Amino acid sequence: MLRRDTVFRFTMLLPLVILTGYFLLLVGSQSAFFSLSGFFEQLSQADIRSAIALSLLAATASSAVAVALAIPSAYALARLDFPGKRLVDTFIDLPMVLTPIALGTLILMAWNTAFGRILDSFGLTFPFTMAGVILAQFTVVVAISVRMLKATFEQVSPRQEQVARLLGCSAFGSFLHVTLPLARRGILAAIILTWARAVGEFGATVMVAGTARGQTATLPSSIYLAMSMADLPRAVTLVVILIGISLLVLFGVRLVMEERR
Amino acid sequence: MIRVEQLTARRGQFTLGPIDIDLEGDSYLTLLGPSGAGKTLFLETCMGLASPASGRVWLDGKDVTRTVPEQRHISYLPQDLALFPHLGARDNILFGARRRQLKREQVDARLDSLVELLDLHSILGRDDVSTLSGGEKQRVALARALLPNPRLLFLDEPFSALDATVKRQLQVKLREINRQLGVTILHVTHDQEEAFMLGEQIAVMIHGRLQQVGSRDDIYYRPATIDVARFLRNQNIFDLTVEDILPDGSLRLGNGISLIAPGYDGAERGVRLATGIRSEEVMVIRPDRPIGPELQDNLFLATVDDILVFGGTHTLSVRLQDSGVTVDVELPNCAMRDLGYAVGDTLQVCLRKRSLWTIPLNGTAVAKEAPDDQLR
């Protein structure tokens, strides 16, 4: 019996060891091309600083808009009954299964219509602008945000909202005083992961905003540019920055999820 | 206080109602029924949490059918209590008062009286309600429901997850609350003991319909439908036919077993009846004692087929010797010790006429004669 347990543990643990080793290999192999002096030298370059700033700024803007829209949308999907709910619930997942390149194409095409031209005449130009970077990131991350928040709201007992109503809260009051506080950990996790996904977005951003250095180039598109020009120190510096951001995000999510209350 | 007229509601394939009920102020009604009977849906519809398909709900003479829940001023204690885990015990209790912006002095006084009544002294300061025991959670939830001074309190099986001792303490407390605070209570339960202990009036709901509303005795001794009789564990139910109507209005029933039963208005020869008697109402006639006049009818010799032991009582399954019909007889342990029956023994039992109830199988009827010494 004990022997069977040992075999079971080994069977489960071996793939985990292989995966961890593989990721350590990927990260560790960067050290051959990485030096601290080179890292700071790359950081002193204006276009790299611009890429970092644009990535952080655009990700913050796109994820803020995405979460702001996702919170009520996710609540509606989790709690309310309305005609066509199943259809809407499926349709809103589209950006999660569609490749970002295709999403970028969809955005570009949409702006090539009468609707896009009207917005353009009001000065809302997205192709090859910073606004385009934000729109591309928003399009990719909003569905992820809705999905995560829907799961979060589903975990809040409707009974608690009902009791709040009977204790004097309006529907909005119950949402504000009961649902949001109870969902706060899930909302925080959704914000962090949405932001992280936006920082790493590449395909749709390149399609919509291009990779103009110092203008629309983000961290991921700068890595692509550096690699295409065989500029390895630059590429590795950018990768290390992205790894740093990712580790911070993962640590943040873990802290939020492990918070006792 | 609350009046419900022809109320119907739907949830999936299930249909509730139509329900008609009128609950007076300061009263205590228990709504008793099996799981899936529609009790919770009924409460939700009355509270405005579920939309009725038809019918009306009146509160203090005002039609509130389309009124939002927060304006109905009904307090609610659900089965899972739904305490707010992000708030401490005190903030949970004060939640309703804050939302309704009640006056500080009024809230403080009310909180003090509830702390006394529900013995919340050691609980009030607790920050994490998830660490409270089951009974403590119940008391916090009850205080939260009572703090806004509701006139109507709905309880939805609030004690189902508690152990017997804590449950009994809280049941006693509920009676006290009903009397001391003058709160009208509608208490949903599937626990018959709880329903009979707490309810001044009892309503029985089965399959989404109110089958019977009445006093404890009405429900216990005179079930209005077969479903109510079966739900209330009437073990001895016989399908009989009226053979004769006697001069005093009693019925002579036959069809397998011959019984004299109380009559009812409109009784006719040949009508099929369901007749029953609770197992604790079946009298065991001691051989050494004279038989009183009221026990002269429905006397049978029987053989003990089986004996089941339940804590404080024994149930004897006896077979009537002349008909072969099986009857359950419940005896308290002390009586059983005195009589000392064993399987195979012969005894004499009486299905006392006035303890029998009758229901015509094509409708409902109430027995003419009611037992006057039912609460033995």
Image (cartoon, rainbow, N blue to C red):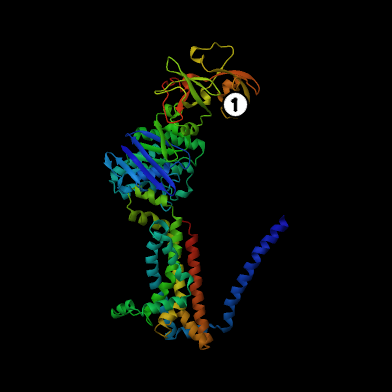
* Residue B245 image offset from top left, x and y in percent: 45, 18
Q: Hey, which quadrant is residue A51 in on the image? A: bottom left
Q: Which residue type does callout 1 highlight?
A: Ser
Instruction: Examine the rendering and report whether any part of residue B16 can be seen.
Output: yes
> How far across and how far down the image is residue A59, in percent?
41, 74
* Residue at image mark 1: B317
The correct choice, above or below, for B132 with respect to B361 in the image is: below
Q: Position of residue B361 (x, y in %)?
A: 46, 30
Residues A181 and A124: in front is A124
Observer-nearest residue: B89 or B246? B246
Foreground residue, B65 or B141? B65
Q: Is residue A65 above or below residue A47?
A: above
Write the residue at 34% across / 40% down.
B6
**Does residue B376 appear in this view?**
no
Neighbour tally class for label 1: few under 14, some 14-19, many 20 plus, Cα within 10 Å:
many
Q: Toward the viewer: B15 or A50?
A: B15
Residue B144's quadrant in the figure?
A: top left
Q: Which residue is most to the front?
A: B270
Q: Position of residue B193 (x, y in %)?
A: 48, 32
Q: Residue at x 33, y 56 (%)?
A: A172
User: Residue shown at 51%/71% (left/top)?
Assistant: A247
Pick the quarter of the image with the N terminus of chain B.
top left
Compared across the picture, whether B311 is left or right of A220 comes to right
Give the total number of marks visible in the rendering: 1
Tell which subunit mark 1 falls on: B
- The secondary structure type at the circle numbered 1 is strand
As drawn, B269 above or below A249: above
Looking at the image, the residue that sits furthest to the bottom is A229
